[in-house]
Image (cartoon, coloured by chain):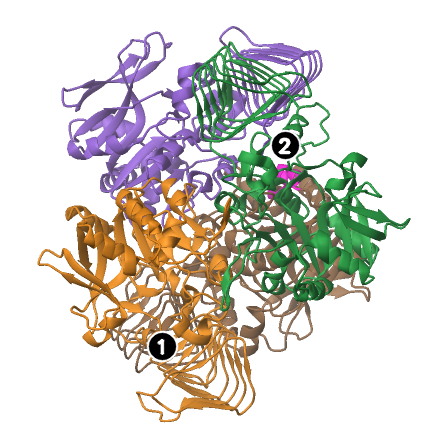
Chain colours: A green, B purple, C orange, D brown
């Protein structure tokens, strides 16, 4: 269990629109998307912070922040409601000479210099609210100190064919970073940046100021600041991470990450009492499985009422599954109401949607490679509708 | 409801609850998969808009204090008023015998409170009520005291209860000992609405006479001195006095209409937040007609049962007609008509069954 | 004591830069300016909300919001940390088609339509975080219902010569508003709008949408929406308010409002236990007045240490007044440190400033009409400096 | 300090505090204008980074519960651990006699806590300490128990205290009854650092032998069986056992150096938040050498005194060498060497004085 590192301020980038998630992020930011039956994506990073003893945490918001603001509040669910500053929401704002939106990740940090300064930390930990993983940041800090590093970047090996989606590093024997390329066309390494950066604050400050003076910079860590630091000879180390880590940036990967929770030996153990994932808990009763229900190989949250059959599904808080309905390989988001004799296969049904009796939602080819169908939030699908799509 | 405060009276009559009240008072006995008994009356008060609720305790209340905390989970962590726990002033048996003198011993609290009407309720009543209509009735009738009653259902099983005889306008004319099972009988519940000033006067009389007296007894004795009216408790109700009632009323939660009304209407029942993930059903699990809380991992089969947060059921285990609090059930174990308190471990292959209608209660922390 | 009006949502405009307050608002928004020894200006409006039983409250921020965000948090000091939404901070944000700053007061409300909609209220109470006053909004709501009004505007009589600084109303016998002019050059009434508007929500929504469609509108309540409503024949009533109300929009009026707290029969009673003014309480000990101290006709807050002489001053939390110093007719903001033999008359010394031994701060003419000198926050005034200004 | 938990032990010896402990335990006696005695040791623990603090109480602890609330004001409203109040399990005199058996009765709490080291402290010690160095000392010395001592100042006034004789390395060799006024004497304080496991063993021994024993007594008796080391308490300290010490140490707060160190260094002392406005001094008021909390309105004169939150002093009233809790002092009244508990009303022109060195204590709610 972690040591309290008050000398470290965490800055959590939660402004992302997540456009590849399509309709899921029309009304909310990507970190606020529901996951795992009762969580939102950002809960994993916030829980990592509290479990690692890291606070204060600044949460940088920009895109559709209301749900996120309401969700985070002063951080009580994550035990981050501290007297001396646990969590602070940092939206863009107007100053004497006018207002500025955050241009890139580095710019977002730069615009909140004074927030970091008021805590006068030794380290700044930059995090992203978009990823699903459990990580003890206090170990990262210890590694950083042992390496006497200026910057430490957490890395994870990814399949070679996916490497070009990430910031990719080449490292020497001693883990010192030799090269960093953001989304390379021809990756020369499969060590991907997890979007977890630990900086010595005095150094980062200099580089952020340098970056601001560069008129052609897009003020992004991966594209500008990290390469510049490397160029100037900073001591930069990779911190290899071996646990579960997932960028849920697409509908398919969000579905996949949910499915990966179902296995008995799931790599992402959310049942560990020593590393709990915290979230806002609604006042819902235990779920009720009726005499006609059949539930197998699934996750079911509180407040659900199930009369139908559920196989390989994540059923989130407050979902109603009517009699005769059969759900397979799907993610049902909170407070969805499914009528009788509904059939769903390989789909994500988003929050508060109502699907009436007899509807069928499935991919045409039906096989395991079929595309995942997304039904957006707060809609009503009329009786006996069919939503299908030719598989990819 | 700004002018109404709540008093929840937790008396020590938990001895009939066997192992479940060895370490805790009756109000903090776990119920319904994630709640404790007190949650129902406390949520009813909070959802009715009461902002000042005092819980009077006698003994074994540490789990209750831990459960209630600052009152935040009921939105009662208020700067003005809010939730307050009232432990006994001193270790004084005379004070503890009756609730009236105990209220009177805490009269400074009542003096400090600005509300003029009090709802006094026992901590072992299962219900989900909005008190607004009852308070309006109380005021419209210009009653001294309004008592609540529930109409017994046919065939709900017998136990002698106090029953009310009412005039057409709702005034109580007599209280008799009756059978709950006689359908339509109006069973007196330990929920009262009365002016704060009257509560203090009754307390003062009891204290001065050295009587260890209960409010309910006083009301019955004073039917002619006071204007006592009765109001029907809407919706589902249960009074949990002993282990067989506990078992019976738990099993009633497995009826769809009970689940849909008790937990949702007119308001949600709040309880202390635990951070448990959704329950995971593994390949080969089989569950029906059961109420399952979060945080369980289930590989076996569960039928007509209630599983609290964090129960582990290994492959091949069978659970039937049982209530299982946070416990671990080994592979191929077989449990029927049992109530397991927290932290019980049932080893693989073990068979434990209770008698028909009489569940077997296993106390906290036992290994079977 | 008020009834809980959940059917009413309050929207508190706290985005103001308050440029007439000069250096006081360089680093913070006007509602965050310190007042009365331990408060910030916005505390009065927030306390009015909680004392009137009005929540949820949406606080619209835009300009330098960090202090305000930290101050408000989830509203615990005002007892507004409610499960079903007590207070929400509403900064401008980016949506699918890009980000928009708030253009005017009406635009700020319009951009948060969905926040109001999720509470589905009957009334919307629009408030300003810039004023010092105590008001029971539940009485305003009752008045509004009695008048069967569409809109009710709280009004206060102001001196005729100041009327042109305000939105001014002409009212009929029955208090129905006949005419409304924002900052008229030739005011025909001295009934000023207090910036407290109660609207029927369904009506307000229509007019906000109408206002958005008008390309030449500056999207302001006083300039656009209220006159349009009047023109279209809405039932609009004035609610006369007779208590203390002050727009502390200038250095002089901020000073004046502080001085008005000193009188034994001050019109603004902050000692009323039935209508407390809430704020964030720092952990400071009782103040200590040394044997050499002389304090008279003043307000002194916790954590102060006084060895000098203080007359007709407001001494805020954590101020140090060295031996031999004489302070008169001044407002000393929190955590100011005054050395020995300092003389100050008719000044406001802003937060955390250090004034060293022997300094003199006063207006040249010294009389009662002299201009108020403002010393800005977080500066150090060297030994024996003199700051003075020719009186106005 | 993640591996250290705190225990504050509030024992019932409040009888020497006269009217001040009529309705409250000693730890909740008001002190220093806005605090209660427990605030000092509790803030010291919280500021040292302890995140798990248990307050063991015996009786008259309702004001203490109200004061501590959820622990929020000390940043101890934590989901894991935090602040917990431990009322006695049962009304059992045997348990209450010694603290060791009381700790043992709550051993499930200690078992549940993950920390391995405990700081045990009494609730009536005034100090402002960061415990980090002492814990490091304890570990470096591989001590079984580390006790705290304070070095008596010359002429601080006498009262027999236990004094320590130490070896060069800090190990305690003997404990003798001494005089506090003998300057340089090392006075044993009721603050101990020890492994949780040892605390439980000592408690078990005491419980098994039926001994109502105090930890301090056990330590003294076991000096040769256990490695006991001593650590000097840095900064200002005071132990408040009776009313004359209460008065004397209150008056010491009026020294500039006490005020500057006790309330600010190494951390701030936290207490329950009240929402009082700044104190208002009217025309004609005259105050010197006094400690004044917020929320007072003062038109009279105050000298060498401590005024708690919300005191009203009318024109012409004179207060000297006194401690005034929230009370109203009428015009031209004259108070000298008095301690007024809360809600006292002194009528206009009334003169009340205590003896030299012996203050007069006026109990809560009295009218003079």
Residue on which disc 1 sits = C255
User: Which residue sits furthest front?
Assistant: C215
| Letter of the chain that mark 1 sits on in the rendering | C
Residue drawn at x 72%, y 58% as measured from the top left: A225
Res A51 visible: yes
Q: Nearer the viewer, mark 2 or mark 1?
A: 2
Q: Please provide the residue range marked out in magenta.
A: D102-113
Indicate the position of residue C95 as horizontal and vertical percent values: 50, 46
Compared across the picture, whether B205 is left or right of A222 comes to: left
Indicate the quadrant containing the C terminus of chain A: top left, top right, bottom left or bottom right: top right
Residue on which disc 2 sits = A254
Image quadrant assignment for residue C196: bottom left
Please, what is the dominant secondary structure of the magenta stretch?
Answer: helix
| Letter of the chain that mark 2 sits on in the rendering | A
In this view, the residue in front, D31 or A288, is A288
Q: Is there CB contact under 8 Å for labels 2 and 1?
A: no
Indicate the position of residue C320 as horizontal and vertical percent values: 50, 78
User: Is residue D105 on the magenta stretch?
Assistant: yes
Res D143 visible: no
Compared across the picture, whether A154 is left or right of B67 comes to: right
Indicate the quadrant containing the N terminus of chain A: top left, top right, bottom left or bottom right: top right
Dot 1: element: helix
């Amino acid at each position: 269990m972690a040591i309290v590192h008050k000398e470290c301020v965490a800055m959590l980038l939660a402004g992302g629109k997540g456009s590849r998630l399509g309709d899921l992020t029309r009304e909310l930011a990507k970190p606020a998307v529901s996951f795992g039956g009762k969580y939102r994506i950002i809960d994993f990073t916030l829980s990592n912070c509290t479990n690692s003893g890291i606070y204060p945490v600044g949460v940088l918001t920009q895109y559709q922040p209301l749900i996120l603001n309401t969700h985070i509040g002063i951080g009580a669910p994550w035990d981050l409601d501290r007297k001396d500053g646990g969590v602070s929401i940092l939206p863009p704002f107007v100053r004497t000479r006018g207002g500025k939106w955050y241009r890139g990740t580095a710019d977002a940090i730069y615009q909140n210099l004074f927030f970091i300064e008021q805590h006068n930390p030794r380290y700044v930990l930059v995090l992203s609210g978009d990823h699903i993983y459990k990580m003890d940041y206090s170990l990262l800090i210890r590694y950083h100190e042992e390496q006497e590093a200026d910057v430490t970047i957490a890395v994870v090996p990814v399949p070679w064919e996916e490497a070009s989606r990430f910031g990719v590093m080449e490292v020497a024997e001693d883990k010192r970073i030799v090269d960093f390329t953001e989304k390379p066309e021809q990756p020369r390494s499969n060590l991907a940046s997890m979007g977890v950066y630990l900086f010595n604050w005095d150094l980062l400050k200099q580089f952020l100021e340098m970056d601001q003076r560069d008129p052609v910079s897009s003020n992004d860590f991966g594209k500008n600041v990290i390469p510049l630091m490397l160029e100037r000879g900073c001591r930069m180390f990779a911190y290899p991470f071996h646990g579960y880590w997932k960028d849920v940036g697409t509908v398919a990967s969000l579905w996949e990450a949910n499915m990966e929770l179902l296995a008995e030996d799931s790599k992402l153990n959310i049942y560990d009492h020593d590393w709990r994932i915290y979230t806002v808990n609604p006042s819902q009763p235990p779920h009720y499985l009726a005499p006609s229900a059949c539930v197998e190989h699934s996750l079911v949250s509180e407040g659900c009422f199930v009369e139908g059959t559920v196989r390989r599904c994540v059923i989130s808080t407050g979902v109603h599954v009517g009699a005769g309905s059969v759900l397979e390989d799907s993610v049902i988001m909170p407070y969805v109401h499914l009528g009788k004799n509904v059939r769903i296969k390989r789909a994500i049904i988003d929050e508060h949607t109502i699907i009436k009796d007899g509807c069928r939602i499935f991919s045409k080819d039906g096989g395991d490679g079929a595309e995942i169908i997304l039904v957006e939030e707060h809609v009503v699908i009329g009786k006996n509708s069919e939503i299908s799509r030719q598989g990819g | 409801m700004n002018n109404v405060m709540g008093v929840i009276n937790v008396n020590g009559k938990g001895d009939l609850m066997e192992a479940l009240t060895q370490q805790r008072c009756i109000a903090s006995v776990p119920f319904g998969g994630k709640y404790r008994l007190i949650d129902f009356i406390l949520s009813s008060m909070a959802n009715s808009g009461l902002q000042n609720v005092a819980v009077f305790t006698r003994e074994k209340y540490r789990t209750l204090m831990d459960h209630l905390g600052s009152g935040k989970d009921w939105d009662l962590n208020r700067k003005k008023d809010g939730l307050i726990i009232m432990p006994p002033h001193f270790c004084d048996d005379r004070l503890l015998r009756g609730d009236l003198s105990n209220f009177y011993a805490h009269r400074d609290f009542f003096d400090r409170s600005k509300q003029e009407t009090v709802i006094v309720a026992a901590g072992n009543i299962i219900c989900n009520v909005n008190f607004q209509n009852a308070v309006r009735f109380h005021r419209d009738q210009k009653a001294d005291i309004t008592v609540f009653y529930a109409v017994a259902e046919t065939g709900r099983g017998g136990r002698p209860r106090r029953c009310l005889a009412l005039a057409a306008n709702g005034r109580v004319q007599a209280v008799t000992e009756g059978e709950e099972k006689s359908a339509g009988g109006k069973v007196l519940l330990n929920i009262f609405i009365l002016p704060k000033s009257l509560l203090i006067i009754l307390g003062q009389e009891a204290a001065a006479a050295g009587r260890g007296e209960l409010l309910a007894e006083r009301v019955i004795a004073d039917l002619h001195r006071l204007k006592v009216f009765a109001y029907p408790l809407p919706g589902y109700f249960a009074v949990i006095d002993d282990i067989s009632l506990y078992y019976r009323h738990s099993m009633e939660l497995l009826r769809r209409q009970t689940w849909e009304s008790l937990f949702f209407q007119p308001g949600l029942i709040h309880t202390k937040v635990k951070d448990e993930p959704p329950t995971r059903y593994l390949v080969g699990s089989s569950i029906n007609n059961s109420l399952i809380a979060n945080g369980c991992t289930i590989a076996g089969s569960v039928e007509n049962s209630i599983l609290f947060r964090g129960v582990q059921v290994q492959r091949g285990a069978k659970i039937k007609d049982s209530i299982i609090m946070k416990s671990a059930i080994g592979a191929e174990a077989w449990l029927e008509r049992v109530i397991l308190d927290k932290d019980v471990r049932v080893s693989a292959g073990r068979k434990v069954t209770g008698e028909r209608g009489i569940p077997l209660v296993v106390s906290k922390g036992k290994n079977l």
